[in-house]
Amino acid sequence: MKYSPVQNYVNGKFVAASTSKTMEVISPLDGNLLSTVPMSTAKDLDEAVKAARAAFPAWSKTPIKERVQVFFRYKYLLEKHLKELSELVQEENGKTYSEAVAEVEKSIELTEFACSLPQLVTGEILEVSKGVECRTEHVPLGVVASIVPFNFPAMVPNWTIPNAIALGNCMIIKPSEKVPLSTARLAQLLKEAGLPDGVLNIVNGDSEIVTAICDHPGIEAVSFVGSTKVAKIVYQRATQNYKRALALGGAKNHLMVLPDAIPGMTAQNVAASMSGCAGQRCMAASAMIGVGNVDSIIDKICEEARKIIPGENLGAVISKESKERIERYIGEAERDGAKILVDGRNAKVKGKENGTYVGPTVIDYVTPNMSVAKEEIFGPVISIIRTNTVDEALAIENANPYGNAASVFTQNGGMARYIIDRASAGMIGVNVGVPVPREPFSFGGWNESKFGVGDITGKSSIEFWTKLKKSTTKWNAESGVNWMS
Ligand code: NAD
């Protein structure tokens, strides 16, 4: 085992969980055992919540301009440890090194945004009638929780940690049991950056801890990022317990290619979108709708896909189960009559026979009722559906239950606007394969890709992590008391 067993992080210290039940942390790159992670209990969560609640009065009363100094130093530490962190992300998640670097760089950008929060939360003040002022302030909620998935071990924790904490909250984070190592390292860097003990706590585990988070009376708000199935469970349970909740779910992103799209650029973007991070991005293109005759673009997409080599410029998928699931989807599509143009099944990487790789896969002549057209595959697979008109393409996109992202490739500005107006997704791209908004714009989908109000990053997150205090004040200058005399 390469690393010592993962522990929880409570009140600034790594501590053992109250259970001997653990899970193995396996590197998807080669199947090697990296560490073990404890399946903590509600008792462990309770300890963490106590530490967070004890830290809250001092942290929330620290002026925000002082609080963000921690994140200026944290940003510097992320930069200083970029290589080491990227290697850790790559090792536990299986993505390529350059993808891991991009993820840590995005974490830096998220931290930069948190450093700008004092400029954004100044509140409002107005004399509403003679001598009477109304004023608003953003007040932190208390102890908040963040439950995160496996696919971005550093970036998704940084969607929530910097903003929630800079805004004055204390946090419990529950990493994915598949990739718990990066979060532990982030906590060490935050401590080095000067974050007081107890402000950030990590409780490792599986669904039992997630349930305990939703039920714990000491937690005010729960953010979740993961699959739609679990997002629904978390949103329902947390709100039933009267907590504020924001739960981001899965995705099935549609990318519409019109006949006037620039072939080379479109093909590169489609191939990169469907295969980046081995297709394990909630923003990955999963279904491509070819409108009219786009045969030459599809040929180029296949050419691009064939340049993507597992173990070289394509990482591994997270587990054996994931690999089997993805390959099952490809097999089903084939049986249902779709045509596999590039087949990524049975990919092997020399010297890494226990790694879990799936090669890039392009499936043509998919019909909207096939499972590869409807369900989230979360692998490097693109399913091509052909239509005659843009409205047919939009009808297919609109009918899918998710709503994270949609993109269009065209040179016609009017047509692009038509699609932006009608696509049913929170994040839309025009000639962009992965339309992730960059800070200060916020990240969040629609429909079954997100439950709750507002977005998880950017300016929108301020509303989620704070509550508004409205004060009305009247100073009776005429009351006769004159302290100045
Ligand atoms: P997941 O839903 O399986 O797990 C997410 C978290 O929930 C983990 O911490 C896990 O321990 C916990 N969990 C798992 N099953 C649970 C249960 N039954 N009850 C309570 N908690 C449970 O997701 P994943 O496989 O880690 O991540 C991949 C999914 O996340 C994909 O569906 C992807 O689209 C989605 N995702 C969405 C976004 C977004 O912004 N919308 C971003 C990243 C990932």
Image (cartoon, helix red, strand yellow):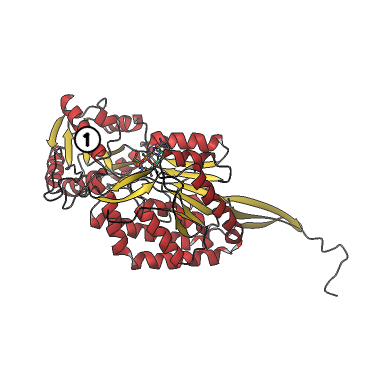
* Residue sitting nearer the eye, 97 or 336: 97
Compared to residue 69, the image places residue 245 above or below, namely above
State left or right for residue 300 relative to residue 206: left
Q: Is residue 456 left or right of residue 481?
A: left
Image coordinates of residue 138 in percent, x first then y, are 59, 54
Q: Position of residue 16 (x, y in %)?
A: 44, 52
Q: How many marks?
A: 1
| Residue 466 seen | yes
Q: Is residue 290 visible?
A: no
In the image shown, does 217 or 62 lie closer to the viewer? 217
* Mark 1 neighbour density, 10 Å: few (under 14) some (14–19) many (20 or more): some
Circle 1 residue? 324
Which x, y percent locates residue 411? 24, 46
Nearer-the-camera pick, 228 or 421: 228
User: At x 35% / y 53%, what residue is drawn?
Assistant: 5
- The quadrant of the picture showing ligand 1 is top left
Give the position of the C terminus as an image quadrant.
bottom right
Q: Position of residue 260 (x, y in %)?
A: 20, 42
Q: Quadrant of residue 54?
A: bottom right
Q: Tell me the kind of residue under disc 1.
A: Glu
Q: Secondary structure at mark 1?
A: helix
